[in-house]
Image: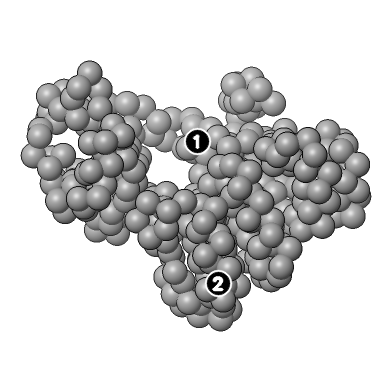
């Protein structure tokens, strides 16, 4: 199977699913389509030989799954290898180059975020909501706008960020660094200005990220939450009760912004809904007092570019009212 030819033949393709002995399936405009071609053992052999390497193959054999990435043509490919009923299987996500993407509707917010010199920025949303793309856009803007040292920690590396004005070091968990938490601690010894975390998975990683933000670094991280305000509770409740007041204080003082994203597809179009929370003094007070449930009320006022997911849905232009109602019901807005 020639992936470069397949990407060229299906420019709107976002995913490829390959299972040994089964027809290859691809996702185009959100719909799954089966091809005549079947998954062959040689395809999996070439993935390890040409892209992932022996360390990932050993992990795949030992754990039953592994993650990695590669570049084919102008596209970055995220690879997840696994087994199904003892057969080899792979899920591949095609990530187009940032220059090939449509302009982001919140360019002004992205630029303001990229201009921050310290603090914590959260990019959140469910799987497949474009978190990695949003994070990469911010990092690319930073790299093109100012001289700084940027360290990213990813699993795997998805978008490759060019070193324009910035010095960029992208590190992959399992290859360049043991895990996210130790990666942040290592990064603090590498004279960083910006640290980006592909995922804030546990309290150890979150604690390291908050320490980095508190000590004068700009830290950007992702979480799997569907509301910006929910991210605050997720972070706080990742810690035992005797540390939660401390974490509230750190968040109130260092959080700069949090966004949450959802994607909605209609035929060949994809609609981005983005909720924006800016940590103003009023919201910082609510975080300290454990009243983050009241934050959406401030977001609804629209101050400092803030908006809720429902407001984002009503703000979409070009979407029919019937389709808007359908979207809001599906996304439970």
For the view shown, which residue lies furthest in the front direction? 242
Of residues 203 and 40, the one nearer the viewer is 203
Callout 1: helix, strand or loop? Answer: loop
Of residues 90 and 63, the one nearer the viewer is 63
Of residues 171 and 13, the one nearer the viewer is 171
Residue pictured at 24% horizontal, 55% vertical: 72
Of residues 6 and 290, the one nearer the viewer is 290
- Report, in whole angstroms, how far the alpha carbon at label 1 lies from the one at label 2: 32 Å
Q: Is residue 53 left or right of residue 293?
A: left
Q: Which residue in the protein does label 1 denote? A: 127
**Is 329 situated above or below 198?**
above
Query: Number of labelled discs?
Result: 2
User: Mark number for residue 214?
Assistant: none
Q: Residues within 10 Å of mark 1 (few under 14, many from 20)?
A: some
Of the two numbered discs 1 and 2 in the rendering, the one whose residue sits closer to the viewer:
2
Q: Is residue 8 left or right of residue 292?
A: left
Callout 2: helix, strand or loop? Answer: loop
Quadrant of residue 289 in the image? top right
On the image, the x and y values in percent for residue 240 come to 73, 36
Q: Which residue in the protein does label 2 denote? A: 189
**Is 177 situated above or below 164?**
above
On the image, the x and y values in percent for residue 123 come to 61, 48
Residue pictured at 40% horizontal, 31% vertical: 30
Q: Tell me, what colour scheme is on the image?
A: one colour
Residue pictured at 77% horizontal, 51% vertical: 251
């Amino acid at each position: 199977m020639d992936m470069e030819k397949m990407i060229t033949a299906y420019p709107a393709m976002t995913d490829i699913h390959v299972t040994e002995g089964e027809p290859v399936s691809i996702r185009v405009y959100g719909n799954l389509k089966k091809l005549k071609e079947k998954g062959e053992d040689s395809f999996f052999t070439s993935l390890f030989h040409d892209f992932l390497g022996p360390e990932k193959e050993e992990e795949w054999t030992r754990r039953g799954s592994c993650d990695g990435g590669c570049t084919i043509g102008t596209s970055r490919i995220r690879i997840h290898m696994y087994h199904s009923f003892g057969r080899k299987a792979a899920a591949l996500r095609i990530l187009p180059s940032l220059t090939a993407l449509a302009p982001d509707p919140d360019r002004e917010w992205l630029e303001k975020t990229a201009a921050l010199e310290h603090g914590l920025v959260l990019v959140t949303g469910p799987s497949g909501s474009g978190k990695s793309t949003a994070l990469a856009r911010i990092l690319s803007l930073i790299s093109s706008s100012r001289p700084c040292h940027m360290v990213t920690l990813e699993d795997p590396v998805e978008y490759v960020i060019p070193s324009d004005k910035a010095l960029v070091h992208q590190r992959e968990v399992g290859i360049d660094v043991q895990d996210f938490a130790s990666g942040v601690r290592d990064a603090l010894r590498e004279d960083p200005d910006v640290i980006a975390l592909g995922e804030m998975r546990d309290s150890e990683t979150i604690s390291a990220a908050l320490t980095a933000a508190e000590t004068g670094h700009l830290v950007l991280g992702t979480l799997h939450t569907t509301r910006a305000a929910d991210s605050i509770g997720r972070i706080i409740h990742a810690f035992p009760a005797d540390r939660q007041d401390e974490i509230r204080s750190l968040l109130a003082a260092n959080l700069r912004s949090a966004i949450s994203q959802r994607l909605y597809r209609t035929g060949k179009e994809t609609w981005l809904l983005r909720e924006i929370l800016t940590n103003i003094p009023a919201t910082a007070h609510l975080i300290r007092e454990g009243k983050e449930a009241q934050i959406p009320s401030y977001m609804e006022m629209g101050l400092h570019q803030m908006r809720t997911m429902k407001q984002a849905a009503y703000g979409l232009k070009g979407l029919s009212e019937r389709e808007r109602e359908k979207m809001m019901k599906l996304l439970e807005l």
